[in-house]
Image: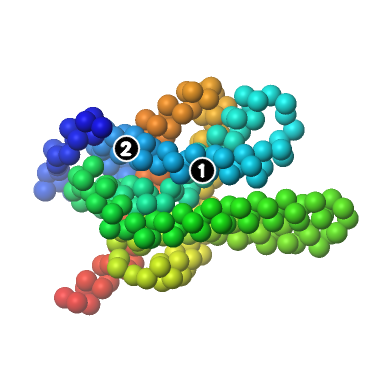
Amino acid sequence: MGLFFNYDKPGKGIDKNAPKKKGAALFFELVWRKLKILTLSNMLYFLVSLPVIAVYFLLLDLLIGNVFETTDVQIHMHIILILTFILTILWGSGPASCGYTYLMRCFAREEHAWITSDFFERIRKNFKYGIVILLCDIAMLFLGITSMRFYSAMYASGKSYALILMALVFIVMVMYTFMHYYMYEFAVTFEIGIITMFKNSMIMAAAALPMNVLMTVIVFAGTYLIASLFTIPAVIIIMFVFWISFLRFPIDFYVARRIKRELIDPNQKESD
């Protein structure tokens, strides 16, 4: 772990007289300027998240393992592994995501953060939120996939109304996925109750549906692309080195700055 501690120091910084960039220009500047830090944060997050990644993998294999019509073990493992990584990127990994989201939030808002000390400090402070979200994730994953398979079998047996039930389950799972873009941000930014965190995340997710859909499609398409181009060991290495940050930082950049603009800045103006 000594690799990560060597970078617990401020970067070069920006000229205070330089014109302020916004939107896409600011995003790409931050990615370039913090490329090394994003990579190190990615590796730290991946290592700490390994137990949760393993749980996702085993659960997905158990729930949908026999859905794929293939006798090739390598292809089967490849599919389950990619679904596991997509789930890790979109849903996070419980307490580890509290630390990682805090780092991404600070990078997005151009605030300083120590990679290792702030990462583990936020895990400690927000452990309750992380565990509750993780337990809900495991329950939702089990119930969602089990329900879809059950209703799919009903539809195949001639019960046409099961298609409506499948659609409802799908919508719930999609909205629950969108909520994850905001849950960890709320957890590390505000001192609020868990119920309030879920409620506010649902409101924010519903209010930005087009952007949420776009970000989700990018994660699926990008991960599918590397899965189709590389072998399983190569995909694992790519995920470990940079891929989570590559796909997750755009989400956290958008969400962190939106929360600051819509919830934090107005309250600061009122208090002033």
Q: Quadrant of the C terminus?
A: bottom left
SS under mark 1: helix
Please tell me how crowded label 1 is: few (under 14), some (14-19), or many (20+) other residues with Cα within 10 Å: some
- The amino acid on which the numbered mark 1 sits, given as a three-letter code, is Val
Height in image: 104 above or below 198? above
Residue 216: tell me if it is visible: yes
Task: Tell us which disc is closer to us: 2 or 1.
Answer: 1
Residue 178 makes an appearance in the image: no
Residue 8 in percent (x, y) is at 17, 39
Q: Quadrant of residue 126?
A: bottom left
**In this rendering, would 91 be left or right of 104?**
right
Q: Residue at x 26, y 37 (%)?
A: 37
Residue 80 horizontal side relative to residue 53, left or right? right
At horizontal 64% and vertical 30% (from top left) the residue drawn is 76
Quadrant position of residue 175: bottom right
Residue 9: mark in rendering:
none
Q: Which mark is residue 44?
A: 2
Position of the N terminus, as image quadrant, is top left
What type is the residue that disc 2 sits on?
A: Leu
Of residues 93 and 41, the one nearer the viewer is 93
Q: In the rendering, at what x and y percent does residue 139 appear?
A: 56, 56
- Secondary structure at numbered mark 2: helix
- Around disc 2, counting alpha carbons within 10 Å, would you say few (fewer than 14), some (14 to 19), or many (20 or more)? many
- Residue position for label 1: 55
How far is mark 2 from mark 1, CA to CA? 18 Å
Q: Earlier in the sequence, mark 2 or mark 1?
A: 2
How far across and down, in percent of the image, does residue 31 sit? 31, 39
Residue drawn at x 44%, y 60% as measured from the top left = 132
